[in-house]
Amino acid sequence: MKSEKIFDALTEIDEKYIDEANIEKITKKKPLFLKIAGAAAAFFIGVAALGTIGFLLIPKASAGGGTNREPGENYMSYAGPAFPLTALEDTDGLSFERNINFDFTPYYTYNESYEDGNGETVYYDAWKNEAVISDNYTVTNATDEDITFTAVYPFAGNISTALSRIPKITVDGKEVKTELKIGPYSGGFASAWGEKNEVERLNLSSLESWYEYKALLESGEYLENAFAENPKMDQPVKVYSFEIEYNVPMEKFDEIDNPDMIVTFDYDTEKTSVYFYGFNSMSWDSEKGWAKAGSYIPKSFNPDFKNHPIYVIVMGEALNNISVKTVAGESKGSWDKREKTDSFSILSEEYESTLGEVIYEIVSSGDYESHYFEDEPTVRNLISDEEYLGYVAEFMYAHGQLSEDPAERYGRGRLDDVIIETGYVSRVLYVTFDVTVPAGETVEIGTKTIREASYDYVGKRHEKDLEGFDMVTRLGTNLNIVKQTASVSNADEIEILYNNFGFDLQNGITSVLLGEEEHYWMEICKIRTSED
């Protein structure tokens, strides 16, 4: 391993890197995080954005309530249906009766306040667009032998899902210990303008309807993949790591305009793959075989302030003509025609490793998580760094730089994107637990889940403040479910405008026997007062 201070011994940037006419350039845009209770927020990703994360999606232009689609179909933000319980084994000899309840207690009005610009307190009504879903099963064993099986309860979510939203499981009224299995990315990709396709895969695109979940789950392959072991990343690589060294007091450094580290190098694009981490701007010429990457050096008042890890990772033949430059000030016509600065230096290390080992260094450092995961504990808190590395590997082999056909979104080797988005892309997760049903007896299995509503950003549903909840009756289950009923409770402050359950709140019909439909849905809104 070699470590040296290289600022004072830098070579000048070659003129070929300055001539950037007709060369693609991408500049990273920091993700914007907004939390808006009970309302929808649309986020749009620029065509050339780097470092965007999984939940920043371009909604499909024709989706949801912005069109004349039937009620209960496609949503721009689809929370996913309530799935039925299933099992890993055959459950011959057992019969199941299912009763699902949608409890709208979260929709009850509560009062909040804020202080306006004049220092006066402003009060307003608020509510949460959530429901508590209790999905319960009465299991009957008609045989003369005890039957034990591994129950599996699916729910839509991701690795950043809050722990409070993981289904709670009881057996005969007692909460039981469960394990969690996490399925692969459930969504797909879209073009720069939001149209789903497999040709221009620049943006992430989540599932928008239960039909897409049906296509995902009905073969059973997705469930098998969720329980399969994730792949390894043992490819040998050469790593160039860079560390910031500040040469002036921080208060003086904070006055510097746009400090950046710029790395340039040549390489054979046919024989070498290059991966980047910690860089927020790039340009390259694939034909001439050079690349240039810049990493912004944060100020002390920046929320990203820390000596964050910066890596260039090389798989294949070595790089040539590596040069590092520290600059500041505004660009003068070209991306790196900027003044050199000695206000900070770069410490460099070169060492041999494997791709998995260096990504593990990033994952275990927690650097990537600092501004991307909620303060509330999430599924990420339940899985080890080694397990998260496995999900990164699975994502890279399926869609990223290790895929035989990588999505264009990941085609330039930025590991930041795939590492962060591994935690945010939509998935189906599975809560598993063991159940024994004694011969000739029954057992009660209870599940309780807090679920957000589905909604549209624009269009008819949005204008009417309509939000959706739904369930599927048979999708993905191998159980013999002989009866299914559904009910709503604590619905005094909502109105069900459309549904195919048969609920009729005005006439007191809040519990129904379900028929042969595969999918049941309702669209609701908050009852407005005359002052609303």
Image: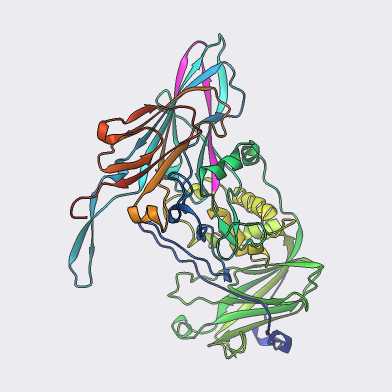
Residue 38, visible in the rendered structure: no
The x, y position of residue 394, in whole percent, is: 66, 50
Q: Residue at x 71, y 54 (%)?
A: 233
User: What quarter of the picture does the N terminus occupy?
Assistant: bottom right
Q: Nearer the viewer, residue 174 or 476?
A: 476
Say if the magenta span includes residue 440: yes
447 in relation to 299, above or below: above
84 in relation to 65, above or below: above
Q: Quadrant of residue 21?
A: bottom right
User: What quarter of the picture does the C terminus occupy?
Assistant: bottom left
Q: Residue at x 30, y 45 (%)?
A: 107
The furthest residue to the top: 144
274 in relation to 234, above or below: below
Q: Nearer the viewer, residue 114 or 85?
A: 85
Horizontal side of 319 relative to 78 (left or right) equals right
Horizontal side of 463 relative to 109 (left or right) equals right
Q: Nearer the viewer, residue 137 or 513?
A: 513
Magenta segment: 427-444
Q: Quadrant of residue 222?
A: top right
Residue 324, visible in the rendered structure: yes
Q: Quadrant of residue 11?
A: bottom right
